Structures are given as structure tokens and as C-alpha cells.
Image (spheres, grey):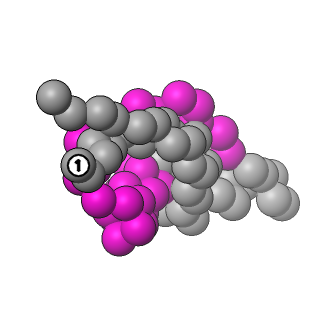
Amino acid sequence: MSVARVTEITSSSKQSFEDAIKQGIDRACKTLKNVQGAWVQEQTITIENDAIATYRVNMKVTFVLDD
């Protein structure tokens, strides 16, 4: 039997939502062991000078705990 845990992370990118997701998952995998999946809960943008400045995502990342 395995036990999983969910943690919420926020990641941002100046390029795209996809890049923000990739950066967040890459960072989570460096810190957490056994990352199994993620749920993108929210996508937002920040605007500066009438243009998109950053793409931001809030994700819930699932990882399996070691025995």
C-alpha cells in the first residue's frame, strides 16, 4: 500500500502558461521524491504597460511518500 501527499505550488514564467507549468514541475521534482502528477488549479496573468508581463499557475502536486 502506498500513501500520497498533495502540496500546492505557484510558478510563473514570462513566456507562457505551459512554461510556468514546466518550471513548477521541474522544481518540484528537485525537492520532492516520487512526484506522480499535478492538477493545474488556477491560471492568472499580470499586466504591465498594457501587455502581459507574467503567466502564473497554481498547481497541486501529488507525490508518494517513502516507506
The quarter holding residue 37 reads top left
Relative depth, front residue between 36 and 65: 65
Give the mark count: 1
Where is residue 10 drawn, in percent x and y? 59, 51
34 drawn magenta:
yes
Q: Residue furthest right?
A: 49
Please, is residue 33 above or below residue 67 in the view? below
Q: Residue at x 28, y 43 (%)?
A: 64
Relative depth, front residue between 51 and 67: 67
Relative depth, front residue between 19 and 50: 19
21 drawn magenta:
yes
Q: Residue furthest left?
A: 1
Q: Residue furthest front?
A: 67
Whether residue 7 can be seen here: yes
Q: Residue at x 21, y 33 (%)?
A: 2
Q: In which quadrant will I find the N terminus?
A: top left
**Element class at badge 1:** loop
Disc 1 residue type (three-letter): Asp
Q: Which residue is mark 1?
A: 67
Where is residue 25 drawn, in percent x and y? 37, 56
Q: Residue at x 74, y 50 (%)?
A: 46
Please, is residue 30 above or below residue 67 in the view? below
Whether residue 19 can be seen here: no
Where is residue 54 drawn, in percent x and y? 64, 58
